[in-house]
Amino acid sequence: MLNDADDAFLSGLRETLPEAAFRETTELYTRESRDRWRGRGHVVAPGSAEEVAEVVRACAEARVPIVPFGGGTGLVGGQLSGEGAVPVILTLERMTRIREVRPEENVLIADGGAVLADIHSAAEEADRLFPLSLASEGTARIGGLLATNAGGLNVLRYGNARALCLGVEAVTAEGRVWHGLNRLRKDNTGYDLRDLIIGSEGTLGIITGAALRLFPRPAAYGTAMLAVPSPDAAVELLGMAGRRLGETISGFELMHRQGLDFLAETGPEVTPPFAETPDWMVLVEIGTPPGMAPDEALEELFAEAAEAELVTDGVIARSEAQRAALWSVRESIPEANRRIGSISSHDISVPISSIPDFIVEGGKRLGRLGNLRINCFGHLGDGNLHYNVFPARGESRDDHKDIRDEVKRTVHDLVHEMQGSVSAEHGVGRLKVDDLERYADPEKLRMMRAIKSALDPQGILNPGAVLAADQGQR
């Protein structure tokens, strides 16, 4: 049984933490960006790993729950708790330092609250690249990004957040600091606790620092938007691009014309890449070493693909402004989706070769539920699609709230049938706890519960996220 963070508990915290560690509980900490989740709690902002440990020790002694809060950009409710005992909302906004940059090792060490954009800037100053890239980089914090194993636009070349981290510093549920900021590429001394903490969404520990991998900056970038006749052609094009361009490919994004129709309908205003929008497009980006001309490489790819009838049209960026304009189309689609208002949104992955069949079968099954619009787009190169379902034009998502659960179940059942994942890059949070129970292998769930019970026996770390609140201590 967990207890509320009441006035007496907060008074005790004030005796051990500086006044700067306390925040007013505003909507910044209690409202999700899409307004689908509302949380509550008392906000505490420690300034160091040791202060985080003090907060956790106090919570453990009083059996008060803790909800770790990064940049608040999560989309599955992992950073908000609206049920159960009133928690401490633990924000890392005072822990934003870039602690160390070692370009000779391609390593950057940062506080868990460091903002992604600041990490990018620090890497750039050292003539290096930290490749984790997503739209929320101006507010997302590295601790939260690692806690959710964030994906983004460059996974095809560089991997998820997990692959970009060498070590973490974390506070355990007992209030102890694990000093795991390992800068080594090779360390086989026992269990990989780093990988256990990464992706655990604050349920096993609170990430207070990270040792991150840096990479050489590409000498030049090349970007092209290519019209393809079908998702099958897009998958074939991906294979062709891989054979021709190898690991220079950093982005391979699939888009349906529905996304551009939404942009035309609601904004944001973007420049359409084609005079007549094709049904399917891919956005390809490569980053090349010195001596390789990216525009020429993309032109040769287009020529071979056109001969194989895999592309029907194409635009290759000839300047940084044109490159930005092509990416603006892709990056504006989520905002257009938000303005339309989805009935149900899905962050899913299936094996790449199964994507065309998934798109066809998904359209058939959803068509049986009514007159719906599907905006399918995402990271084809790593099998991750954002497969979102919308009402017909002139209708609202509230008109279809009676079928919202059926839409979600239809999509997720199909994903499961095709050996995919119902959470590709956003995490489980609180939104998908029931989905995890429904689709995960029973032995996986048993092992997860055993780990949760061992590392957080009182269940104070982000209760209700990932595993149901009463499941972690079985």
Image (cartoon, rainbow, N blue to C red):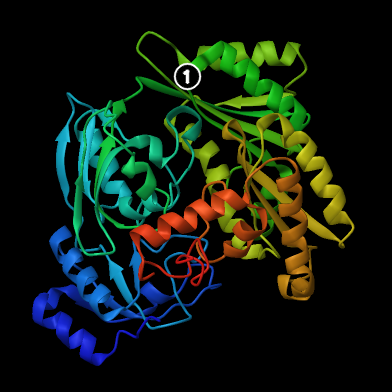
User: Residue 40: where, in percent of width, then height?
Assistant: 40, 81
Identify which amino acid the numbered label 1 is placed on.
Glu
| Residue 446 visible in the current orientation | yes
Left-right relation of 297 to 137: right
Q: Nearer the viewer, residue 128 or 471?
A: 471
Q: Quadrant of residue 186?
A: top left
Q: State whether residue 369 is above or below residue 426.
A: below
Left-right relation of 415 to 323: right
Which residue occupies 54% across, 37% down? Answer: 326
Q: Nearer the viewer, residue 280 or 248?
A: 248
Left-right relation of 76 to 119: right
Which residue occupies 19% across, 31% down? Answer: 126
| Residue 203 visible in the current orientation | no
Crowd tier of the residue under label 1, counting other residues whose Cα lies within 10 Å: few below 14, some 14–19, many 20 or above: some
User: Residue 389: where, in percent of width, then height?
Assistant: 73, 58
SS at circle 1? helix
Q: Nearer the viewer, residue 406 or 197?
A: 197
Q: Quadrant of residue 237?
A: top right
Residue highlighted by disc 1 = 247
